[in-house]
Amino acid sequence: MSEKIPTSVRPNRQRKLRNLMVTNVFICFTLVIIIILNLYILIATNNLSESLKEQPLRMPLLNEIRSEEIMPEEIRADDILPEEIKPEVSISGERVPLVGFSLVLSAALSTQDEWEEYQEESLAEYDVTEYLGDPIITTPLGYLEKKSLPSDYYPGVNFSYFKSYEHYRGIGKYTESGRVTHSDNAYTDEVGLRRYKVENEFGANYRLTDYGEIICDDDYIVAMGNYYKEKGRANQRFLIVTDDGSFTVRVGDEKDDSATDPYNMFTWHNHYAGPLEFIVDQRILDRNIQRHGTVSRGPVGVLSNDIEYIYRIHEKS
């Protein structure tokens, strides 16, 4: 015998059914609106595409762009001197990143020769020393990224004196490292150190004079740990700033992780830490270097100095 539903319960069930129907109607209405909006956007996009096909864009040639079309009349390309170039420059009171500014200025200079002459002057006069210690230094050539030193993790450790070396013939020609060490651009200098020719005159040496000027010079080829570079890769470039000058290096070999500290920054040589291992031709290597086992005892003064900063060089492509 079925139970009778109390009369007071029936209105509650009817109320719930009505609420459910109202909710379903609202959801259906919302879906219809969304479908209509999507159709409208699709139609508008198709119309825009058709219009772009009918009227193709044309980029002006470099010699068609005049400086007055890019900059205000009061600012001419000739007014912006190389000594004013810093990581940021000011145009009409606004701070503009150097990379973007270079693109604007290159369009303002009417010929390729003018642009190359401007780059050469900027390179010669740009003073990096003002920004040494900054995490990122923007230059006319790209930017420098500051890397940690062994002393940041091992306070008091001497990582400048012992600069070990290895014979370049021990590096396979057809390996990632060999493509640098045995490259046509690689050669052995008069000291017996392997060097890498820098072909692009704006490309890339950041060796500094006493006045902070950038001078083109060839890289020393070295081995470094994977803390400083991508594992299994070579050809990265670094600026090594010392307490009396600087030099650039190019990675031509990789320190094995098992032979380095836990951070893969350097190799221990007794109580000395060595982040740099120079690639050499041992047959003609300087006698003092061979006698003492470190490049620091050779005739190249800057290689004997204490390292203050290591910067990874990121060049403009």
Image (cartoon, rainbow, N blue to C red):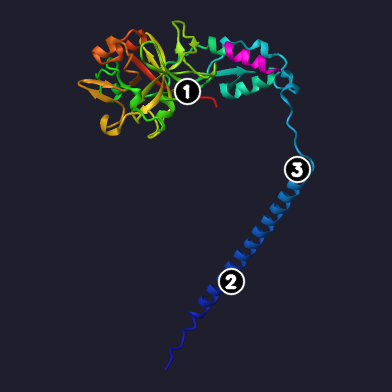
Q: Amino acid at mark 2?
A: Met
Marks 1 and 2, how far apart in space?
80 Å
User: SS for tag 3?
Assistant: helix
Q: Which residue is mark 2?
A: 21
Q: Which mark is residue 52?
A: 3
Q: Position of residue 100 (x, y in %)?
A: 60, 25
* Visible residue check, residue 169: yes
Q: Position of residue 266 (x, y in %)?
A: 29, 25
Quadrant of the image containing the C terminus: top right
Q: Read off the magenta span.
A: 110-121
* Visible residue check, residue 297: no
Q: Position of residue 139 (x, y in %)?
A: 52, 18
| Residue at screen point 57% across, 21% down | 98
- Marks 1,3: beta carbons within 8 A: no
When the figure is inspected, residue 24 is found, relative to residue 273, above or below; the finding is below
Residue 47 highlighted magenta (yes or no): no
Q: Residue furthest right?
A: 54
Could you say which is closer to the camera, residue 310 or residue 25? 310
Could you say which is closer to the camera, residue 215 or residue 108? 215
Q: Which residue is mark 1?
A: 184
